Amino acid sequence: MSLQYHFFSIPALHPQQAQDELNRFCAAHRVVTVERQFISAGTDSHWALCVAVASGPGKLPDVLKAAERRTGTGDAGAGARVDYKQVLGEADFALYAELRQWRKAAAEQAGVPVYAVFTNEQLAETVTRGVGTLAELGAIDGIGPARLERYGQELLACVQAARLAHAGSPEHARDAIGLEALAARDNLMLAVWKAARGKRERPAVARYLAGLDARLDELATSLVEQRAPLGHARRFTIHDPKRRTITAACFADRVLHHAILNLAEPRFERMLVASSFACRPGKGVHAAVQQVQRQVRRWP
């Protein structure tokens, strides 16, 4: 099985003939992706399209199965959509839904289709197998070294965050956060990857990651012994437009901050009212504005 690329031009004026040709082509081939760009050129304006199709013998790779199902070009019965809400248990489906949200954000950031990050089947297997390491993730069909390197750690961090949140479910709402739980290796690893997200090329972050095991051992020991080290904050002044002095925590301190938040945030979230939007995951200024607009439309 290999990919072939075909190019089409659909004029903005009188597009019917070219559109019919494209539809006939798509109906006769196993379409994988369609990339399009509108070219503005007055009366010659048109859509430029690049259509990738699968050719040759053999099955599509797992990463392309979702595309085949969307176009309806698979074998009979193979294109049936799986209702994972019915297949997975309640807790597993909640984790699966969180992984889909993460995948959407990762795909938008990388500028690729969501199934190029991980397919639905791969996310479901991640949940049902209880994946917790890169080796276990790589054992799932269709997840190779390149995808592990690019997305593996972030996926595992998302899984771990969800498990920690579940550990802080209502029956544990009044439990204190113990130093042993704070110093747990899984919690510290998750904190590192959260703190390093999008910053791995910075010298301070690269130095920390280069000696990661030793640094985490030192941090865990200091937490249990109640002597958490304090790093050196960086101070600088900005003008936006007024003059402000900013104190930025060093990377080691940010790791500790995330480690605390991993355990504390689920507990705080349960105590906050739904109409609170500041500094909360999945909320913020835009969500608050949208809520106000909904309320105004409902009660003008």
Image: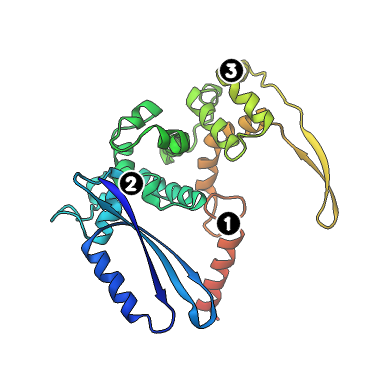
State the mark number for residue 119.
Answer: 2
Within 10 Å of disc 1 (Cα), the crowding (few <14, some 14-19, many 20+) is: few
- According to the image, label 3 marks what residue? 224
Amino acid at circle 2: Thr
- Establish if 155 lies above or below 178: below
Amino acid at circle 1: Ser
Q: Position of residue 202 (x, y in %)?
A: 66, 34
- Establish if 251 lies above or below 19: above
Tell us which disc is closer to us: 1 or 2: 2
- Establish if 221 lies above or below 162: above
Amino acid at circle 3: Val
Q: Is residue 149 left or right of residue 194?
A: left
Instruction: Check the picture and name the quadrant holding the C terminus.
Output: bottom right
State the mark number for residue 276.
Answer: 1
Within 10 Å of disc 3 (Cα), the crowding (few <14, some 14-19, many 20+) is: some
Q: Is residue 180 left or right of residue 133?
A: right
